[in-house]
Image: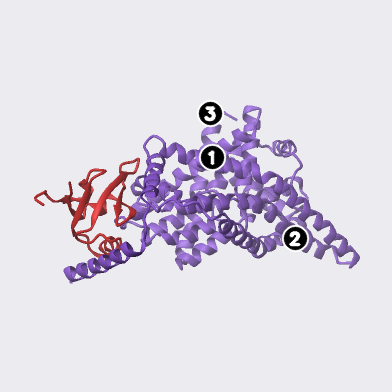
């Protein structure tokens, strides 16, 4: 568990990570929590849009696309 | 507060997962297939061409498939008009009343229904199919970057798709965009996507323009021309969205989350009922309340004479100078104004004005239409600007009413009418001046 923490936006495609903290506030925070992005949730970066942003993540079995503005606010710890 | 809430949400999700693990059986293969399909439809290489190809294919299918049923329906409905006339004669109904009711109201109604219904009946099921299949969210995923730059939401592309069917339906669909600002942008710009009511005009004008310009026109080159108009509409949408987000609706983009649901094969039965029956009834209702009274009014304007010519003749003459500035003429401007209740009526009104006839008409062949237009001073510039004006001008009456209902604001409704009209006037003016400056017509 000694891996460095990073933002979800930096997670490379195909890699998985565990949510540490959701830093967003207000409406954005509500929406991210609604999606199941709570601490200890495992998230996988699935694919990028052809334009590079947004990125689709696998969150609890659902595929959800987030813009970098949102994924930057989520702190994760990469899993091997 | 924050940590407690996180704990509560985490506990809820944990419990949900435990229940799901007990009762849901998963087959691994399904997600693999989804993953592979997404690998193609959202790839850098195939993503955009596939989208454009599908769009073109749906247009082509709608255009070529609607021809025959449209003809059938119009024969049927206009045939019934003769019966109505016979009944009126038998009852000794005065000529003016027969004119208003049968030649105006009923004819307007028959027109809108026969032009509008068949393409809708093809288009909506096709789009509902893509929607139910799960493809449309991928389109939003592919295009979000573009919309983000314009200060808009990726889901706007879905409301625009709906707008191809009907702008009023597109405006209602804007409810799926959560943020008020992006929603308003989507509402105000939906009209730049040409609806089914405007497609016949775009197609006819494309044929006229290509015929006059390149000497020949077929359904494929006309489809390409219409697709070009659509692409232009999308570019204008992005530009106006950007403009609105920088000025009237300035602020940061809202939060963006978009689910990419698993692909499912749609249930065809439900799909057909939902898309055909619901929309069919919607269109019929719309035609009755909006187009029929418009038909009656137009008949009155065309048949009440002041001095030498009808009211339409007078109004057309008044608008001549303004029309000419835009590369159009007075009758075209008038036809667009009178066509406010329903865009389908623009060409019939125009033909009626040119022929100085008392009833809305359609010509038997494209050739007949082309010679009539040329006899009235048309060039390919007129046809081109007709396409541009139709693409960019004010939304129809139904759409404006829907915008009023959705925004609850007269101010935004007014803007929704004036903004596109301004864009249409500026674009047509510039095109006309440039073409004339270089002596291209």
- Is tag 3's residue or tag 1's residue first in the polypeptide sequence? 1
Give the number of callouts: 3
Q: Which chain is purple?
A: B
For disc 2, the chain is B
Asked where in the image residue B182 lies, by quadrant, the reply is: bottom left
Identify whether B350 is placed above or below B372: below
Q: Nearer the viewer, mark 1 or mark 2?
A: 1
Nearer to the camera, B419 or B175: B175
Q: Which residue is mark 2?
A: B106
Task: Give the colour in which the image draws chain A.
Answer: red
Q: Residue at x 65, y 65 (%)?
A: B289
Tag 1, which secondary structure? Answer: helix
The residues bearing labels 1 and 2 have C-alpha atoms spaced at a distance of: 34 Å
Q: Which residue is mark 1?
A: B56
Tag 3, which secondary structure? Answer: loop
Residue at the limit of the structure toward the left, as seen here: A2
Query: Residue B438: which disc?
Result: 3
**Quarter of the image where the C terminus of chain B is located:** top right
Mark 1 vs mark 2: tell me if same chain. yes
Q: Can residue B308 be seen in this snapshot? A: no
């Amino acid at each position: 568990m000694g891996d460095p923490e990073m933002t979800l936006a930096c997670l490379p495609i195909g890699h998985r990570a565990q949510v540490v903290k959701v830093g967003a506030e207000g409406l954005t925070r509500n929406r991210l929590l609604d999606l199941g992005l709570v601490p200890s949730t495992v998230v996988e970066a699935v694919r990028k849009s052809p334009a590079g942003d947004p990125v689709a993540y696998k969150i609890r079995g659902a595929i959800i696309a987030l813009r970098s503005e949102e994924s930057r606010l989520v702190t994760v710890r990469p899993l091997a | 507060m924050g940590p407690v809430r996180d704990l509560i949400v985490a506990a809820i999700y944990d419990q949900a997962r435990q229940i799901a693990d007990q009762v849901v059986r998963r087959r691994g293969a399904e997600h693999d297939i989804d993953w592979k399909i997404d690998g193609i439809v959202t790839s850098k290489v195939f993503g955009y061409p596939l989208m454009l190809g599908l769009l073109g294919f749906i247009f082509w299918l709608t255009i070529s498939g609607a021809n025959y049923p449209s003809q059938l329906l119009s024969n049927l409905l206009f045939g019934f008009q003769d019966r109505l006339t016979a009944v009126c004669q038998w009852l000794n109904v005065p000529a003016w009343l027969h004119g208003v009711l049968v030649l105006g109201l009923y004819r307007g109604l028959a027109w809108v229904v026969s032009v509008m219904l068949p393409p809708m009946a093809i288009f909506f099921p096709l789009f509902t199919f893509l929607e139910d299949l799960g493809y449309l969210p991928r389109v939003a995923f592919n295009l979000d970057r573009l919309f983000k730059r314009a200060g808009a939401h990726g889901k706007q592309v879905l409301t625009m798709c709906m707008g191809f069917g009907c702008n009023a339906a597109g405006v209602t669909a804007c409810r799926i965009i959560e943020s008020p600002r992006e929603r308003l942008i989507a509402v105000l710009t939906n009209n730049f996507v040409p609806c089914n009511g405007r497609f016949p005009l775009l197609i006819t004008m494309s044929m006229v323009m290509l015929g006059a310009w390149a000497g020949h026109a077929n359904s494929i080159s006309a489809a390409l021309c219409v697709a070009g108009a659509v692409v232009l509409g999308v570019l204008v949408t992005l530009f106006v969205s950007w403009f609105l987000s920088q000025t009237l609706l300035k602020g940061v983009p809202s939060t963006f989350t978009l689910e990419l649901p698993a692909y499912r094969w749609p249930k065809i039965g439900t799909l057909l009922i939902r898309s055909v029956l619901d929309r069919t009834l919607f269109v019929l209702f719309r035609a009755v309340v909006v187009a029929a009274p418009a038909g009656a009014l137009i008949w009155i304007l065309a048949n009440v004479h002041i001095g030498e010519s009808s009211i339409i003749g007078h109004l057309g003459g008044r608008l001549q100078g303004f029309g000419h500035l835009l590369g159009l003429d007075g009758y075209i401007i008038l036809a667009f104004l009178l066509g406010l209740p329903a865009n389908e009526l623009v060409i019939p009104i125009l033909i009626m004005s040119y022929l100085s006839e008392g009833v809305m008409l359609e010509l038997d062949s494209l050739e007949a239409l082309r010679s009539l237009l040329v006899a009235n001073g048309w060039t390919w510039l007129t046809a081109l600007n007709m396409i541009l004006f139709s693409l960019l001008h004010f939304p129809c009456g139904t759409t404006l009413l829907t915008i009023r209902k959705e925004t609850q604001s007269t101010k935004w409704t007014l803007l929704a009418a004036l903004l596109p009209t301004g864009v249409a006037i500026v674009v047509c003016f510039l095109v006309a001046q440039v073409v004339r400056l270089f002596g291209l017509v």
